[in-house]
Amino acid sequence: MATPTGSDRASQAYRRLRELIVHGRLAPGARIIETEVAGKLGISRTPVRAALQRLQQEGYILADDSASRARPIVAPLTREDADDLFEIVGGIESLGARRSAELDAERREGLVELLQEFNDGMARLAQSDRPDRNRVFELDTDFHHEYMHAAAGPRLKALHDAIKPQAERYIRLHIHVLADQIRTSVSEHQEIVDAIREGSSGRAARAVWVNWKNAAARLGEVLEEVGERGSW
């Protein structure tokens, strides 16, 4: 078996740290200490440092210059940041939806069948008195991933894969409140499905944009209620 290279270790550290941040196990505003991370992951500080630099470039962590020695901290969850992220993701996914609507009829039919299955699953959960919030998140994520990756090119997919988890971080940590608005999301998703079914690229792009714009507004209301996290 080949010995992992420094690049491999840095990639592993990056994936692990990103997962911890996105899932909320590294709290917003928490300081990250290289030696502690290296010890927990069983690697040297060099690949950890490379992973932290990449995470900082992508916006998952920030440099806290208020301390005597700058240390990285997990990016806070703020309304301003959420608005920016959701607008960016909305723009990227609008392109993906537009291209999905331009697929040939056979491929489009297969995609629509999957999208309808995911949305129908969300609709059923909306009828439950106590919907499974994790399942709501999974179905919503699968829905957006499917139309986004059905026709997007490698560059658009890479951009989406880099930025989308940052938006998912907000959704994951507030799903207990956002799950109460499933019916609205189902209705907005159905507009996307119908537009792709018809092959209407402009309508599909607009429907996705509206969905993300409204999602940002819904999240904004939640943040007003529960407060921002990790801000200073």
Image (tube, rainbow, N blue to C red):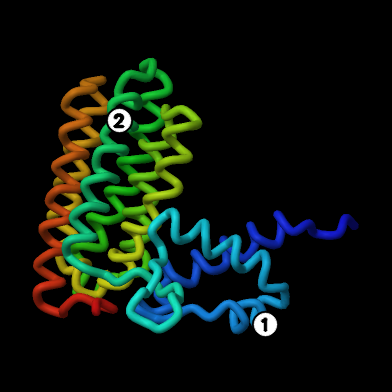
For the C terminus, the quadrant is bottom left
Q: Position of residue 39 (x, y in %)?
A: 67, 82
Q: Residue at x 41, y 19 (%)?
A: 106
Report the number of discs: 2
Q: Residue at x 48, y 40 (%)?
A: 158
Q: Nearer the viewer, residue 171 or 140?
A: 171
Residue found farthest to the front: 68
Determine crowd level at label 1: few under 14, some 14-19, many 20+ residues with C-alpha closer than 10 A. few
Q: In the figure, 173 relative to 155: above or below?
A: below
Q: In the figure, 87 relative to 51: above or below?
A: above
- Assign a secondary structure to mark 2: helix
**In the image, what residue type sits under mark 2?**
Leu
Q: Residue at x 40, y 69 (%)?
A: 63
Number of the label disc, if any, that sits on residue 39: 1
Q: Could you tell which of marks 2 and 1 lies nearer the N-terminus?
A: 1
Q: Residue at x 26, y 34 (%)?
A: 94
Q: Position of residue 54 (x, y in %)?
A: 52, 56
Q: Which residue is mark 2?
A: 95
- Assign a secondary structure to mark 1: helix
